[in-house]
Image (cartoon, helix red, strand yellow):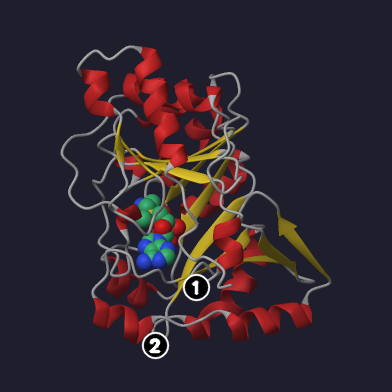
Amino acid sequence: MILDPFGRPTTNLRISVTQRCNLRCIYCHREGETSPETEMTVDEIVEIVKLGVELGIKSVKLTGGEPLVREDILKIVKSISRIPGVQDLSMTTNGNLLPVYAEDLAEAGLNRVNVSLPTLNEQKYRAITGGDLKPVIAGIKAAVTAGLNPVKLNMVYMKGINTDEVYSMIDFAAKTNTILQVIELEPVNLDRDFYEKHHAPLDALIKYLSERAKEVKVRRNMQNRKVYVLPEAKVEVVPPIENTEFCMHCTRIRLTSDGKLKPCLMRQDNLVDILTPMRNGADRAVLKNLFIEAIKRRRPYFIPSR
Ligand code: SAM
């Protein structure tokens, strides 16, 4: 396994399989992608994952855009799940198409799923995403029934929009046998005014959860994220902004939908294009070196002050 210049392993690969989406979420960071020039084929994705596995990747997350709008998504899941060395394959989805896909995804080898759920209020859901909440709720239940485990509910925490809903979301997680994941709003690909108006630190929520938790677990190798085990449900918090601990424990690298390795969500200036050389016939050794180069470019975005 290769370590980055800060001694961190790179074990997680987060792949945008498309930038197309069936929703228009007002808070979406689009995984830090700007304007994709092309979309990788299944074979190209699989080849890049294989190179990553040889360099220490163990866990793969599919994201987007909306991964389920790709017509060949089951083929992508099936092919990646069969790569020896991939120990964990998951997906982040808006859940709209989960009622159709949940069972097939589980059968194809997907282990677990994160479903974006910013609110439980139908009108608010439409205002935030442009879509209908009902299929998402049905999709969450379908994913649990299909045995995708755990099913996590990704709630981006936004002042003036949904911070008052955390408590009903905890109840919903308890009722549906899912885990609530509360995510701090990140300023990527967002209008500055929107960010300033709606960003809220998670400190008060973390204090509330700490006081109520019967146990607090730390997800090592996942930016040391904390999971608060409440009497009724588990709640995970993701506070990345200005968080040096989060960055020091980051083990993630991204692959954009147009085939560029992206060492950090927050940066646009250090990507490594692996798809163009692959399409131009570069041999495996060259491609592997490009992957190594991307790992070497990993830097904690928020660095502890001395
Ligand atoms: N369409 C899929 C979905 O809705 O989950 C996958 C793409 S979405 C960009 C991936 C994840 O990023 C979701 O969990 C979403 O909640 C999160 N996300 C999107 N914009 C964000 C932002 N500005 N700050 C923090 N998280 C964000």
The image shows residue 142, relative to residue 129, as above or below, that is: above
- Most distant residue in the right direction: 214
Q: Quadrant of residue 159?
A: bottom left
- The one of 147 and 10 positioned closer to us in this rendering: 10
The residue lying at 58 percent from left, 38 percent from top is 3
Q: Please tell me whether mark 1 sits on a helix, a strand or a loop.
A: loop
- 6 left or right of 99? right
Callout 1: few (<14), some (14-19), or many (20+) C-alpha neighbours within 10 Å? Answer: few
- Residue shown at the point (74%, 78%) measured from the top left: 210
Label 2 sits on residue: 160
**Local secondary structure at mark 2:** loop
**209 displayed left or right of 116:** right
Along the viewing direction, whichever of 210 and 56 lies nearer the viewer:
56
Residue 94 seen anywhere in this rendered image of the structure: no
- Residue 181 as seen in the image, left or right of residue 174: left
Q: Residue at x 27, y 57 (%)?
A: 23
Mark 1 CB within 8 Å of ligand 1:
no
Which residue is tagged 1?
A: 242
Residue 101 in the figure: left or right of residue 174:
left
Sequence-first tag of 2 and 1: 2
Q: Type of residue at label 2?
A: Gly
Residue 47 picture location, percent across and down:
40, 20
Position of residue 111 relative to residue 176, above or below, is above
**Is there any visible trace of residue 100 in the rendered image?**
yes
Residue 260 position in % (x across, y down): 30, 37
